[in-house]
Amino acid sequence: MNAIEPRQTAARCPICGKPVEPAFRPFCSKRCADIDLNRWLSGVYAVPAKEDEDEDGARPADSREGDPS
């Protein structure tokens, strides 16, 4: 029986595209790892969120409903 092995491609740094260095995986260097960390800490990377809905998907009650002012 001859099993087909999946083809492995060389991993690339997500910041600069150079080959990954095992000591800094998934990056090529400490510099690229630090760039990525700075992007997370400064808010460049963000998970989109809808603030219109509560966690269960229901819209929160508007406290101004029925208020004549």
Image: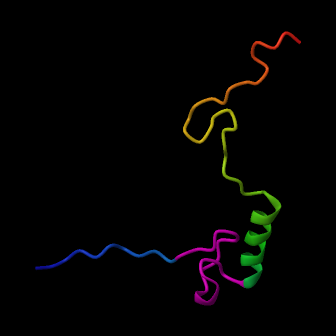
**Horizontal side, residue 5 vs residue 56: left or right:** left
Instruction: Tell me the quarter of the picture where residue 42 sits.
Output: bottom right
Residue interval drawn in magenta? 11-29
Q: Position of residue 21 (x, y in %)?
A: 61, 86
- The residue shown at (80%, 69%) is 38
| Residue positioned most to the left | 1
Residue at the far right in the pictured view: 69
Question: Residue at the front extreme?
Answer: 67
Decide which of 31, 5 is in the foreground and name it: 31
Q: Image quarter for residue 26? A: bottom right
* On screen, residue 39 above or below 13: above
Residue 53 shown left or right of residue 3 in the figure: right
- x and y percent of residue 5 in the render? 28, 76
Looking at the picture, tell me which residue is in the foreground, 10 or 65.
Answer: 65
Taking depth in this image into account, of 54 and 15 the one nearest to the observer is 54
- Considering the image in quadrants, where does the C terminus appear? top right
The answer to if 57 sits in the magenta stretch is: no
